[in-house]
Each structure stands twice: as structure tokens, then as C-alpha cells.
Amino acid sequence: METQVIRVGKQVAIAAAYEAGKVLKERFGSIGAFEEKDSYGDIITEADLAAERIILHVITTAFPDHHIRSEEFGDNEMSSDWMWLVDPLDGTNNFAVGLPLFSVSITLLYKRTPVLSVIYEPMTDRIYTAVQNEGAFCNQKQISCLPAQSLHRARIGWIQGHRVQNEPTAVKLRHYLDINTKRMMRLWAPTLQWCMLARGDLDGIILYNSEGEDLYSGVLMVQEAGGVVVNYEGAAFEGMTEHPYLIACRQDHKDYFIRLVREGLQ
């Protein structure tokens, strides 16, 4: 039963992501006004809402009894072991200023564990998929975050929650990482950074208190691409948590990044 739900869910999520992505691509560069969601810099556009309506319709039609938590419309409060997390437009700030770096993110969890991830990048027509214990793929080609190279100075992605802002500890760690790595990237579109790590174009990701509908699709993508996701103490990250502090990288770089983060927090 679980395998069947995941198999059907994958096709449903891919179809929803493509349909929503088409709307985002059509509206890119012509969104007009946008609304500030809070005082922390998060915004919402009509494109977010249009894409989310499409995704929710596709999922609820196929799985009317599943729990869904979505970025804009919130929680349907259904009681189910199956939970969908939907971010219809990860990278809204990029989208709003005409920067073509954004994605659609859809995750299916079973008993709070991610089992299916679909991330679609409309502007490049790249669709990333991952199923628990089946690997990670980009446009049906398997990807891996295990490049055959030594690590001297890392290329990393930094992800922090909207509410973190300039919290002193975050600023301290961020600055340390910036001056002690080759490149530190902040894309305003976390799922794209997770995909970059999954395909071997980043060495690691440091995440500081950023939980949301886009997190778990990226975590599963990296894990299925052969990477590890741990907390700052090195314990494996599993399930869900409200305040995640994470390191993601290839297995043989884990000690390097734990040491780097520990030094940055001293």
C-alpha cells in the first residue's frame, strides 16, 4: 500500500509541478505589485497563489484524505499518516525582481518522514525527483553529490530562516564561513541550493534555523544523491523539527564541516 501511494504520488507531484511551473514561467517578468507577508522581507505575489491553487487541486483530486501543508493557503488539518508539503514558488523575492532563480517544491511524507521529493525549475525545465531508497534524478538522469575531488576550500550554500535576520550568532557564523570558504552562496531559493549539492556543484550547505515547506524536499534530494544531513553536533537528521540547524555534504566531508561550524560558533 505504501509503495503504491508513493508511486502514484510521484506522478501526481510531477504533473502538478509542471502545470504550476508553466504558470510561473508565463508570469515571470510581469507580476506587477506584490504584498509583504511580514516585516522580515518575505513577500507573496499572485503567481504564488495561482501556482498553489493548481498544485492543491491536483493533489486533493488524487488524494482527498491526505494531510496538506502549503506555503500560502496553510494547513487543511486532515488527519492522515500521509502529509504533503507544498511551496509553489520557492524564491519569490527572486521572481519579483526578475531574477530567474526559483522553483516549485512538493514533498510527500509518511509518518513525518520524507519519502518523495519533486523540485521543478521552470526557467531551465529541470525536474528533480527523489524517492526514499531509490536515488535522486534530474530529468530522469541519476545525480550524485559525490564528485571525485579533494576538499581544500569549500563552495557552500548558506540558508537561514526569514526571522533570523541579523541574529548575532547567525551573523558570526555566516561571516566566519564567508572568509573561510572558497565561495558562500545565498540564492534566496533554498531548494535550488539543495539541488546543486545533490548534483555535485556545491560541496556543502549550512542551514541556520530555516524550517518550512521547502526544507524536506531538499533534504531527501541530497540524502538520495548519496549525501548526509546532520545537525551541528553531527547526529543524523531524521523526521521533522521546528528549528533545524543543519549541515549537508558528502559523507567524507562531514567532519570537515562540523569542525568549520564549531569554529565559527566559538
Image: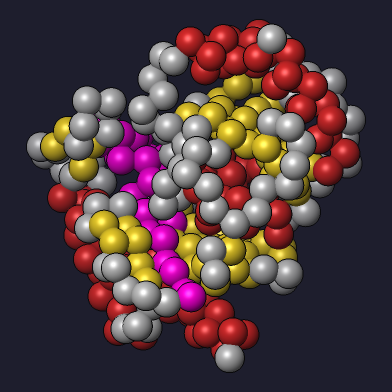
Say which quarter of the image contains residue 45. Answer: top left
Residue reaching furthest to the left: 33
> Looking at the image, which residue is at 72% across and 71% down?
134
Spot occupied by residue 88 in the image (x, y as percentages of width and height):
33, 56
Say which quarter of the image contains residue 262. Answer: top right
Nearer to me, 105 or 141: 105
Indicate the quadrant containing the C terminus: top left, top right, bottom left or bottom right.
top right
Nearer to me, 83 or 125: 83
> Looking at the image, which residue is at 89% across and 30% down?
150
> Looking at the image, which residue is at 83% across and 43% down?
251
Q: Is residue 76 above or below residue 34?
A: below
Spot occupied by residue 89 in the image (x, y as percentages of width and height):
33, 50
197 with respect to 171 (left or right): right
Q: Is residue 181 above or below residue 50?
A: above
Total marks shown come to 0
Nearer to me, 63 or 100: 63
Q: Which residues are magenta?
A: 81-105
Spot occupied by residue 123 in the image (x, y as percentages of width and height):
40, 50
Does the stretch in magenta take in 34? no
Spot occupied by residue 127 in the image (x, y as percentages of width and height):
52, 61
260 with respect to 178 (left or right): right
Residue reaching furthest to the front: 79
Q: How is the image coloured?
A: secondary structure
The answer to whether residue 26 shows anywhere in this view is no
Indicate the quadrant containing the N terminus: top left, top right, bottom left or bottom right.
bottom right
